[in-house]
């Protein structure tokens, strides 16, 4: 498994700079294909209004149309369906906004679960929390990992690329208590067609990259709750 040093100097500097970027959220390369002019098609299953792996993959690919500056400041947001300004975000926001396209509001779901089960979630000392905070909880990788696992979404972490399917959510260790998160999509690596690409934001905006095993994998999830057709969601556009 390659180390994180494969990433560009800019990505590494953005992630390791600390302070505002990683200090607020506590968790959050080789470019396989440019997102410029990316040909995005509507998911064939979109008309059914269900949360499916295919639709999550399409929603993640659709994120490549957006210009997002990596910025992890704490910002008060509305609830439910709250979002930071669309021009900013971190790795977790890529996941949150992709699920929103499926009608799944992770802000509400994580907050409700944390409100009932606060001590079942990690509470890193640097966060200094005494209770849930709907502004930020869902934007922290350890909390998303705990939520997916608590709701039956955890699948085994392996070194076999074929085990990672489009629509899967993957997390990686970056060192210390820092973790990263992204979505496996329906595009394959030019170096190994059995390995799917990942849409993520690791310091340089949202990209599609061949990074599945370029960092130590810390979590592997498939989370697709039932969503009724016509469910309203907040657009990240």
Image (cartoon, rainbow, N blue to C red):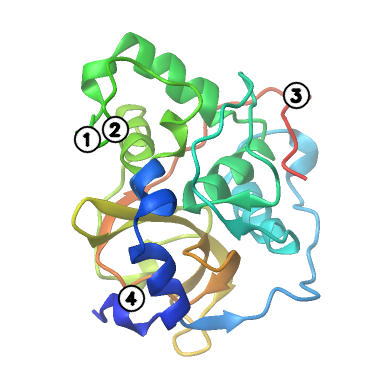
Q: x, y percentage for residue 80?
A: 62, 19
The residue at which mark 1 appears reads as 124
Residue placed furthest toward the bottom? 191
Q: Are marks 4 and 2 in contact (CB under 8 Å)?
A: no
Which of discs 3 and 1 lies nearer the camera? The answer is 1
Q: Are marks 2 and 3 in contact (CB under 8 Å)?
A: no
Q: x, y percentage for residue 97?
A: 62, 43
Which residue is located at x 22 percent, y 22 percent?
120
Query: SS of the residue at dot 2?
Result: loop
Where residue 233 sits, quadrant-wise, is top right
Which residue is located at x 23 percent, y 29 percent?
123
Quote the CA–CA distance across marks 4 and 2.
28 Å
Query: SS of the residue at dot 1?
Result: loop
Quote the CA–CA distance across marks 3 and 4.
37 Å
The residue at which mark 4 appears reads as 214
How crowded pointer 3 is (Cα within 10 Å; few <14, some 14-19, many 20+) is rated as some
Query: SS of the residue at dot 3?
Result: loop
Quote the CA–CA distance across marks 1 and 2.
6 Å
Q: Are marks 1 and 2 in contact (CB under 8 Å)?
A: yes
Which of discs 4 and 2 lies nearer the camera? The answer is 2
Quote the CA–CA distance across marks 1 and 4.
26 Å
Quote the CA–CA distance across marks 3 and 1.
33 Å
């Amino acid at each position: 498994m390659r180390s994180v040093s494969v990433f560009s100097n800019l990505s590494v500097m953005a992630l390791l700079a600390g302070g505002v970027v990683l200090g607020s959220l506590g968790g959050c390369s080789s470019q396989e294909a440019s997102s410029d002019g990316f040909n995005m098609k509507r998911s064939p299953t979109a008309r059914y209004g269900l949360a499916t792996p295919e639709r999550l993959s399409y929603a993640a690919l659709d994120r490549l149309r957006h210009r997002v500056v990596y910025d992890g400041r704490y910002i008060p947001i509305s609830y439910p369906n709250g979002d930071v300004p669309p021009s900013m975000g971190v790795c977790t926001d890529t996941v949150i906004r992709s699920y929103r396209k499926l009608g799944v509001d992770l802000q509400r779901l994580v907050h409700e679960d944390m409100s009932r089960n606060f001590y079942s979630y990690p509470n890193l000392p640097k966060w200094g929390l005494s209770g849930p905070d709907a502004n930020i909880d869902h934007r922290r990788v350890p909390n998303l990992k705990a939520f997916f696992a608590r709701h039956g979404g955890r699948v085994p972490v392996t070194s076999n690329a074929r085990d990672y399917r489009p629509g899967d959510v993957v997390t990686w260790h970056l060192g210390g208590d820092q973790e990263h998160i992204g979505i496996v999509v329906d595009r394959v690596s030019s170096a190994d067609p059995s390995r799917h690409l990942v849409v993520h934001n690791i310091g340089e905006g949202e990209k599609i990259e061949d990074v599945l095993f370029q960092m130590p994998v810390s979590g592997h999830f498939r989370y697709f709750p039932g969503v009724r057709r016509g469910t309203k969601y907040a657009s990240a556009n």
